[in-house]
Image (cartoon, rainbow, N blue to C red):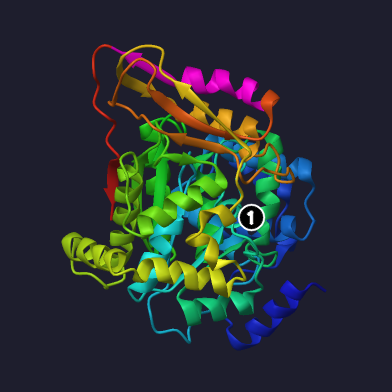
Amino acid sequence: MSIFKKVYILLVLVLPILSFCEDNSQFRILDIIAKKRDNIELTKKEINYFVQEYTENKIEDYQASSFLMAIFINSMTPDETAYLTNAMINSGKILNFDEISDPIVDKHSTGGVGDKTSLILAPICASLGLKVPMISGRGLGHTGGTLDKLESIDGFNVNQDSENFKQIVKDVGVCIIGQTKDIAPADKKIYALRDVSGSVESIPLIASSIMSKKMAEGLDVLVMDVKTGKGALIKDYESSLKLAIAMQNIGEKLNTKVIAIVSDMNQPLGMAVGNSLEIIECMQILKGECQKGQEDLRDLSFTLASQMLIAANKAENEKDAIDKINRVINDGSAFEKFKEMVKAQNGNEKSLDDYSLLPTANFKYFLKATKSGFVNTLDAMKIALGSSILGSGRKTIEDEIDLSVGVIIYKKISDFVEDSDILLEIHYNDESKLKEALSFFEDAYEIEDENVCSPALIKKILK
């Protein structure tokens, strides 16, 4: 008998009303597949059956693939999506922070290019009295991963067990780790199948995957940053908005406050793309040393943090929240909180002041403009693909990455450039990879005589 079933039997004796686990003899996976194929709404019990049986290897991959494809084609209702999320949450361990009186908050981004806001807002919120247990991911494809960036810091350990994780959150206020085996194992198994069966882009499947991992953290408040644009997973605004609404609906049905922000990802966020380079940029923001080209990174990080503070009743309104954020930036307490987290997770905090202790590429190449004019396009996807060729990204989760390579962006959309001005500072270690990447970097820029407005950073805030 599995551990899950033993726990269920014990709970049934204490809580007869518990309904997650059912007598599954009344269900057949073929009937459930056919029902979803015919676009008939599934019940909570049917969805629980699928998640439980598939997690325990009692449903074949080819049957689960058919079910996921039926969802991809016919979508899911808000109730079905909430049932799926709840079943995946309950497939594993749910963290309990009952001994902590401070609000438990987190943030999640759907992924983008140069997106490093977690590393800025988490210490800000922790320094203002929130507790931030953050379970993050690695970079895959064109999106960078928070864990990879943190591992640029020598010794930083993202593999904490649940007890260490909880203790660091309690003592420091923030801890950032990778997904553990006992957090939403159903999601991990289902996601792996989605990845090879053509059902990754389904909005209810994306929403339930993200929310199951996050809500297993035992949160009071979750702020979602849903990216839209060329460098986002979902590129059109309307679909991005649907995803934001879907995740907010899940939060409402499962009694967790969810705020969703739709933000622009047509050009990279900030100036740095690449793991150790992004750590340096985050330290500059946390030290109050924001430079030209980093304003969007600062502003989005502060917006996300302010929404977390307001929702957790640590600020009265946006002005009050921003004032508090600026205070912990200016007095250095947000930066010190980040150092405290790094030390607690066995990282070398000295590298946060001495950047030479971070991984450093052997060579630099400066890409220059070939004409004068205004930057009308800075394609985030092409910058990401070029950086990935240099070694900053991975095609599969097992790939090794080069933590030292990447780019510093000198010119962004609506900036004026003179002929021969530097557009990109490229950090590389392999000449052949540079040559391959250069075509992507060159194609990322369009320079025209007429200026265009920089795209609006915040598209929508759903509270």
Crowding around mark 1 (Cα neighbors within 10 Å: few <14, some 14 to 19, many 20+) is many
Q: Which residues are magenta?
A: 433-448
Q: Secondary structure at mark 1?
A: helix
Left or right of 107 on screen, residue 60: right
- Residue drawn where x is 71% and y is 40% of the image: 396
Query: Magenta segment: does it hold 436?
Result: yes
Residue 189 visible in this rendered orientation of the protein? yes
Find disc 1 in the rendering and name its residue.
Answer: 187
Residue 256 lies, in percent from the top left, at: 40, 66
Prevailing secondary structure of the magenta residues: helix
* Vertical arrangement, residue 236 with respect to residue 146, above or below: above
Residue 220 lies, in percent from the top left, at: 40, 71
Residue 43 visible in this rendered orientation of the protein? no
Displayed quadrant of residue 305:
bottom left
- Residue drawn where x is 46% and y is 36% of the image: 408
- Residue drawn where x is 62% and y is 71% of the image: 346
- Residue drawn where x is 63% and y is 32% of the image: 390
Displayed quadrant of residue 167:
bottom right
For the N terminus, the quadrant is bottom right
Residue 316 lies, in percent from the top left, at: 18, 69
For the C terminus, the quadrant is bottom left
* Vertical arrangement, residue 42 with respect to residue 258, above or below: above
The residue nearer to you, when weighing 242 against 334, is 334
The residue nearer to you, when weighing 450 against 367, is 367
